[in-house]
Amino acid sequence: MRDQSVSRRHLLKSAVVGSAGLALPGLLGAETAIAASSGNGSMIGVPFPKTEKVRVGLVGVGGRGSGLLGDLLAIEGVEVNALCDIVPAKVARGQAQATRRGGKEPAAYTKDEHDFENLCRRDDLDLIYIATPWEWHVPIATTAMKNGKHAAVEVPAATTLKDCWELVDTSERTRRHCVMLENCCYGYNELLVLNMVRDGVFGELTHGEAAYLHDLRGILFSDRGEGLWRRAWHLRRNGNLYPTHGLGPVAHYLSINRGDRFDFMVSVSSQEAGLSAYARKRLPEGDPKRSEKYACGDMNTSILKTALGRTVMLQHNVSSPRPYSRLNSIAGSQGLFVDYPARIFIDGQEGREEWQNLDRFREKYEHALWKKVGDLARKMGGHGGMDYVMSFRLIQCLREGLVPDMDVYDAAAWCAPGPMSVASVSNGSAPQKFPDFTRGRWQEKRPDIPSLL
């Protein structure tokens, strides 16, 4: 019974949150005024204070949170001191997970949906990991920063432009970092190709393709886990509900916020069919889910244009039967890389119209992070090891006092296509202008994920 009540509560809350995206066109015109009004200093290039032991609190100990907890417990120099979830059994499971690893039992916060506020007030935490339903990401991240902690928030970090700005403004005001936990930026192929891009293998870059194409129908209709809240977003929003997995790596290839920026975008959605068909086929007569009407089209396709004239195709589809893909493609004047499966074509190669295997480039371009911790990452297993590499690198940045690879401006820029796609679709695919979350500093060339550690 608890699962059903939680499901109902989260579906109603998410539906209300999702409907806010339909009012976005009015917000877009105010972005210049918002950007100009802030007197806070930028967080671009600001290193973490060097912290030998990184003390972590985790909010959200469900399926995703448990995986993140396992990675954190395996990283040297990490101390997990507190766990928070509205389901006490999940926190208890996390506490047992920590003690089995030989650590002390983390404190539990399970009183209500706002008990994370008490966790954030603790004086023995440096970093708050956030793995909750999407509508809680910004409230928890901003609370963490206001209490002097850095925030590491799951994707998408924000679902409205207003909340993107709230993260940026709070990070600047508190001088605390807000890092989105975009694990796909740390995938083996993604980092290898990033090294190739930096070495000029593809020449002058012109176009990228990014996506989240993943059959989630079983998860969306589940009576537990993400099924308790994620399907609700499909009831009210028609656009790209989950843009960052595909977009993050391509944004790194294109040096977004580091010499280029997203300028504007247009978006179009197909009709909805997949979730309705699944409900009719799989759910029993009388199940209230069968009467739900979904606003979100099965396939959303957006085209983004950058200030330097590059283009990005960005897609989202979690409602259709299909193999998994993030597209993950980058093209330039000398060739291109296309993933799923990974293949490459370079101008002047032998076999003029044949793809090459990526293996021939691994020895030269394998990223230092995968050389350093790749074997352990693969044993940990989270999404092929990218989860562990991501958390290892974030903790390394805190322990060594380094500038984070991804900052709050990246989080905002990569999340913005979510609400902007809704605004475009609802206005006949009208172009939507990107806010400049960096307040003019996007032209500064600076590193993201270093090639050498």
Image (spheres, grey):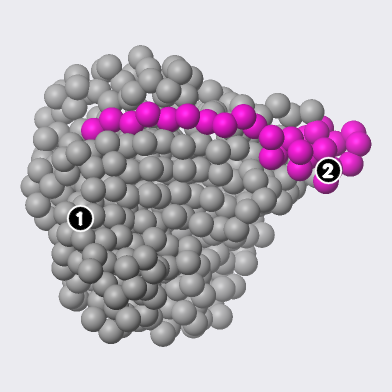
Camera-nearest residue between 301 and 231: 301
Q: Is residue 183 above or below residue 268?
A: below
Q: What residue type is labelled 1?
A: Ser
- Mark closest to the chain's N terminus, 1 or 2: 2
The residues bearing labels 1 and 2 have C-alpha atoms spaced at a distance of: 48 Å
Residue 396: give x, y in percent of width and height.
Answer: 26, 71
The stretch of residues the image draws in magenta is 263-290
The 10 Å Cα crowd at callout 1, few under 14, some 14 to 19, many 20 or more, is some
Left or right of 388 on screen, residue 249 = left
Work out whether residue 117 can be spotted: no
Camera-nearest residue between 421 and 30: 421
Residue 202: give x, y in percent of width and height.
Answer: 22, 62
Residue 403: give x, y in percent of width and height.
Answer: 17, 60
Name which residue lies at 46% across and 55% down.
326
Considering every residue shown, the one lying at the far right of the view is: 285
Where disc 2 sits, the SS reads helix
Which quarter of the figure is the N terminus placed in?
top right
Where disc 1 sits, the SS reads loop
Name which residue lies at 56% across and 44% down.
317
Of badges 1 and 2, the one in the foreground is: 1
Residue 33: give x, y in percent of width and height.
Answer: 19, 19
Q: What residue type is labelled 2?
A: Lys
Question: Residue 281 has which mark?
Answer: 2
- Quarter of image, res 125: bottom left
Question: Residue 333 has which mark?
Answer: 1
Which quarter of the figure is the C terminus placed in?
bottom left
Left or right of 452 on screen, residue 268 = right
Left or right of 381 on screen, residue 226 = right
Camera-nearest residue between 78 and 441: 441
Name which residue lies at 38% across and 43% down.
313
